[in-house]
Image (cartoon, helix red, strand yellow):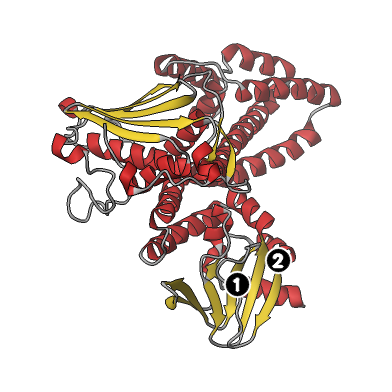
Amino acid sequence: MQSTIIIEALRRVPLFEGLTDEDLRWVAEQGFEKLISAGEVNGREGEPVEHLYVIFEGDLKITKKVDGNEVVINIYTPGTFFAEVPLLAGTPFLATGRAITDCRLFLLPDKIFRYMLTAYPSFSHTILETMAQRVHILQSIAGQREKLNSLSTLAAGLAHELNNPAAASRRAVGELRASVGTAKRLALELGRTLSTAHLEALAALEREAVEHAAAPPSLSTLELGDLEDEVASWLEKHGLEEGFELSSIFAGAGLDAEWLGEVEAEVPNEALGSVLRYFGAAVATASLLDEAEAGVGRISALVEAAKSYSNMDRAPLVEVDINEGIEQTLTVLGYKLGPNIEVKREYDPDLPRITAYGGELNQVWTHLIDNAVDAVSGEAGEAGNGLVRLRTTCEGDGVLVEIADNGPGVPEEMQTRVFEPFYTTKGVGAGVGLGLDVSYRIVVGRHGGDIRVVSNPGDTRFQVRLPLTPAEALTGTSVGSESTREIT
């Protein structure tokens, strides 16, 4: 009875709109309800987060400490979910929740939340879209503005990148229902009309067809068209009205007229049409399963990249693969790389791992690559062809990361100021001037490294030098003070 009540409540929550009744039943079994009395706190800023929260009933006030004062940043009402940002970022609660009225909440454990991000595209899309919106609100209030900006970039990038594999998976699953139904109906029909010997021969041919579908030959458009015509002609001669549809399925799997002749030789003439339709459904099912698996695999890979990008579940100071971190950043920013922007990678394959604050370094790569992409977008690059070059190499007892672009460059009089807070070369409303300031403090203040810009029209290079171990940062020496901010 209690489970039925929870399922009905889940059905009214927009977050779960894309789930079936069976899915909702499973979700209800994984989570649990929590009642909060009016005035009671649920999740205090700085406390660890272990669940995604969904409000079934009541209103919850969200506040954050700013300069010692509690500032109301939102009111969550029934149907709202929260705590997705700290769960994905691996941080404590970013704000405090206090019940305005008696509240009835549903709590979903972190492990189940992460699984649902990969298994249910509509769920992950809603989570990431809402996360991006909330991070934007927090940016205007929280002291760590640029860290939250990286999370917003992560959410926006993932929401964009997830669209294609999610749509492909939905389409494949929808078509699977039809092909599986057809295959089951024809299998029952053939089981009643064919002998055991015929069925054994067909089973071998079916295995061959499915194997072809799993690893089809690489054919040019012209070659594929010729093969489809060959198969369609064979099917037409044998009286199959749906020859055109079946020809694209068989040709796509690399099955030709010779293979069809083998099938014909193994079955009675009167059963040939049903057998080929069955094989068509079986091959289509195998291909659609591969498509759905590829789509889910892509979604899983994107979520894993996001996890690595934000260094979830890791200690702040870790061994970092710089090349991997830059690639993860490119995955997050992939939606901004248009067809006229080329990314050239010059990674040192023997680059040593360094001890660093991985999540913070990913913020640096995000700011620098994002700036480079902005610089070469539109007419910024030479002849409209933007180039972003990423280079890593060993240098002395540390590593050098260089992020370059062929944009218009930074004027010489501005180069000494680009790392100042709130100073930006972008137009009004296009930037707040904190990205390079935060990058400077992370590289110099946290890691004891160096960051500088060398710029001429058509060649701007931001150079980041990092020690193998951030000795100054670990000993507490302040190396990020204003007096050390010099561009040489």
* 66 is higher (above) or lower (below) than 385: below
Q: Where is residue 74 in the image (x, y as percent from the top left)?
A: 44, 75
Please tell me in which quadrant of the rendered image residue 145 appears.
Answer: bottom left
Res 72 → quadrant: bottom left
For mark 1, what is the residue? Answer: 43
Residue 219 drawn at (x, y percent): 48, 15
Above or below residue 434? Residue 485 is above
Q: Earlier in the sequence, mark 1 or mark 2?
A: 2
Residue 100 x, y percent position in the rendering: 53, 86
Q: Nearer the viewer, residue 48 or 19?
A: 48
Disc 1 and disc 2: Cα gap in Å? Answer: 17 Å
Q: Which amino acid does label 1 sit on?
A: Gly
Q: The C terminus lies in which quarter of the figure?
A: top left
Amino acid type of the residue that numbered disc 2 sits on in the rendered structure = Gly
Residue 95 visible, this orientation: yes
User: Mark on residue 31?
Assistant: 2
Taking the view exactly as shown, the residue that stands out farthest to the right is: 196
Q: Which residue is drawn at 22% across and 39% down?
A: 416
